[in-house]
Image (cartoon, rainbow, N blue to C red):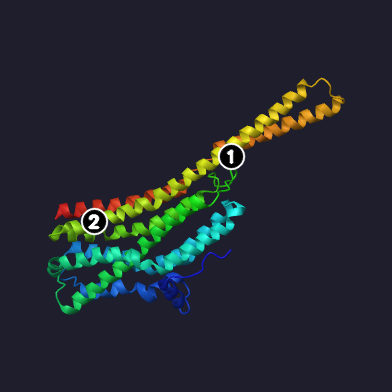
Amino acid sequence: MEYNETSLWMSRLVERGRDYVGHPFAAALCTMGWIPVVTTLVAVDPAEASLTFLVGQALACLMVVSGPYDVWYYDERLLPQFFDDIELITAAADRETLQDLANRYDRFYSRYWWASALVWVVLVLLVFAIGQSYFESQGITAPVERAAYLVFFCYWLLIAGLRSHGGLITVLVIRSFAERVELDIDPLHPDGLGGLSTVGTFAIRMTLIISLGSLALPLSFQIANHIQYGSVVYAGVALFILLVALNFFYPTYKVNRRAQELRERMLDSHRERIRKLERRLTLLHSDDDLPDDELAAEDDALLEMEIRRARREFEDYQSVHLYPLSIGIITRLVSSILLPIFFIIFELVITGSL
């Protein structure tokens, strides 16, 4: 099935860049990724700014350089691939529902990105306005420098908004999938998770993209420490941390609950099947009027074989892990959580040493 009906405007821009530069990352860098680098070079004079500000600004710039590529990757690769992979554990009767969900959220991602960006417009531009005194102390005083720094902030909020939008879509997609689509869990799937590793991989990859926002934490804390309304900055930091946590834990929890319900139904079905087979075997043994002893022995062996097979299937379903986490997924999750913590500690150490 086709799971990529439309594309976000930034993804289309990167695709056009690929006509001239083959690799999507290089195309993203050439089309829009250069903007934060150029605006930083125009706005910030290393001779006038402090070392901590330069480091914070460099990290904040690095955070959004890859933004166009991240958007393209989610739109053109990650989201369609999720629906393609999840089709393997979707009941055949719900394939059409899966296609409808794919089309719905593909359109939602490409058409309503601005709704998520609006939140960051308010927060980021408010920080830019109330942080003017601090920026002036770092040498950003000339009209051209201020204009360039405003462009940097606008570009930054755009990328933050698009990444947040992708995180929101990820949560909504998995919630809708868990609620509307019947799972076809395979207890013998190679991932050892009944095929649910697809959900964990999808969630953690988007979590890693969002966690790149931690690169802006040092600069954010510097601004918060030097302006009167630092709570505005901390509100943005809190929103970022919430997105990182929500983007992984909610989807995996939701799918786990749904898979647990399905497993209980399957186990109940297998219990009933085993009991019926055992009752048949008991009746076979207790029937003294069987006309053919050889036929009875053959039926007896077949029933015992069927009972053993039913018990193995029951044990397979009972033992399969349904929380979509593997060692590799957990490693990536820990990395995405440790990255923000590292930069928080980094900022505290740097601030305390000065």
Residue 45 falls left or right of residue 334: left
**Which quarter of the rendering shows the N terminus?**
bottom right
Residue 69 in picture, x, y percent from top left: 41, 68
Report x, y in % for residue 166: 40, 61
> Taking 237 as reference, is 30 above or below it?
below
| Amino acid type, residue under disc 1 in the picture | Met
Return the x and y of residue 132 as percentages of the image width and height. 15, 68
Q: Which mark is residue 266?
A: 1
**Residue 324 seen by the camera:** no
Quick one: label 2, few (<14), some, or many (20+) residues within 10 Å?
A: few
User: Which mark is drawn over residue 235?
Assistant: 2
Left or right of 143? Residue 117 is: right
Label 1 crowd (10 A; few <14 / some 14-19 / many >=20): some
Measured as percent of width and height from the top left, residue 115 is found at 34, 65
Under circle 1, the secondary element is helix
Q: Residue at x 27, y 53 (%)?
A: 238
Callouts 2 and 1 close, C-beta under 8 Å: no
Q: Nearer the viewer, residue 12 or 22?
A: 12
Mark identifier at residue 92: none
Amino acid on which the number 2 mark rests in the picture: Ala
Q: Can residue 38 be seen here?
A: yes
Residue drawn at 35 percent across, 72 percent down: 33
Q: Residue furthest right?
A: 291
Q: Secondary structure at mark 2?
A: helix
The answer to which of marks 2 and 1 sits earlier in the sequence is 2
Please tell me whether residue 310 is drawn above or below residue 134 in the rendered image.
Answer: above
- Horizontal side of residue 146 vs 312, given as left or right: left
Residue drawn at (23%, 58%), measured in percent from left and top? 218
Single out the mark in the foreground, 2 or 1: 1
Instruction: Please indicate whether residue 93 sits to the left or right of residue 306 in the image.
Output: left
Q: Quadrant of residue 98?
A: bottom right
